[in-house]
Amino acid sequence: MKYLVLIQARCGSSRLPGKIMKDLSGKTDLQWVIERVQRSRLIDEVVVITSIEKQDLQVVKLCAELSVRVFVGSEQDVLDRYYQSAKLLNPEYVIRITADCPLFDWRYLDMAIEQLDSVSDYMADLKESFPDGEDIEIIKFSALKKCWKEARLASEREHVTLYIRKHPELFTIQQLDCPIQGIGDKRWTLDEEGDYKIISAIYDYFISKNKEDFVTEDILQFLASRPELELLNSKYIRNEGALKSIANDKIMQLDE
């Protein structure tokens, strides 16, 4: 297997509890994310990775209903969850997608794969040129294994690629640029109630038009006609969870 997509999903969000199971025009957020990622032409498989917590049994149930493979692992050590699940399938590359991205654009995933240099250990949008919620990270499995072995800080275990970003001297890193300029300040992720209101409005509009395959340009056009929507989540900052984790960091004791 060359390209394995792992969708990180759990129900224990502190800011918007149960967000990945929230309804968006008749389907859960998580189902939309899975279906949008599956539209990619170049990936080999999509696997959802969730936690061992009781509240995440509903994730396992949904994946069973959708015939999507699911892996259950550590809730807090997300890096271990990624590594252990990927190790079972032994891909050349792991593609990290989070389940709070229901506006994910699969075309950009294919674009990233086509642009990926064979020497790159890690490809991501380090310049934040994509809207928050269209994030794509491609990690060579050997680099993921190195992170798993060497990362010790709690923030590095919770945020899977933070160790790579902090140690560019150890990895070959490739920048992924958004083909549409000037939209990196858009917030299309699902993490707050204001985010849910915006994303719900977007889904309600396009599903009413019988258009499930709407893409970035469609969203931009819709929001241009409804500028008041973007005020609903304009106060939130990007990567708030990662910043909080770093501020409260500690060294983790790991099983060898």
Image (spheres, rainbow, N blue to C red):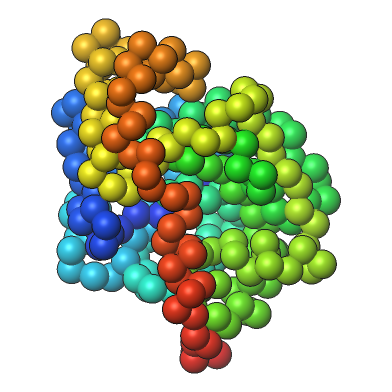
- Against 230, residue 157 (above or below) is below
Quadrant of res 70: bottom left
Quadrant placement of the C terminus: bottom right
Q: Please provide percent x and percent y for residue 221.
A: 43, 12
- Against 35, residue 85 (above or below) is below
Left or right: where 41 falls relative to 179: left
Quadrant of res 212: top left
Residue at x-position 56% and y-position 43%: 136
Q: Is residue 148 visible?
A: yes
Residue at x-position 26% and y-position 8%: 209
Identity of the residue furthest to the top in this view = 209
Q: Please provide percent x and percent y for residue 51.
A: 32, 66
- Against 70, residue 155 (above or below) is below
Residue at x-position 18% and y-position 63%: 55
Left or right: where 17 falls relative to 67: left
- Looking at the image, which is closer to me, 67 or 236? 236
- Looking at the image, which is closer to me, 172 or 51? 172
- Against 10, residue 95 (above or below) is above
Residue at x-position 82% and y-position 67%: 169
Q: Is residue 254 visible?
A: no
- Give the mark count: 0
Q: Please provide percent x and percent y for residue 161.
A: 59, 61
Quadrant of res 150: bottom right
Q: Please provide percent x and percent y for residue 192.
A: 28, 47
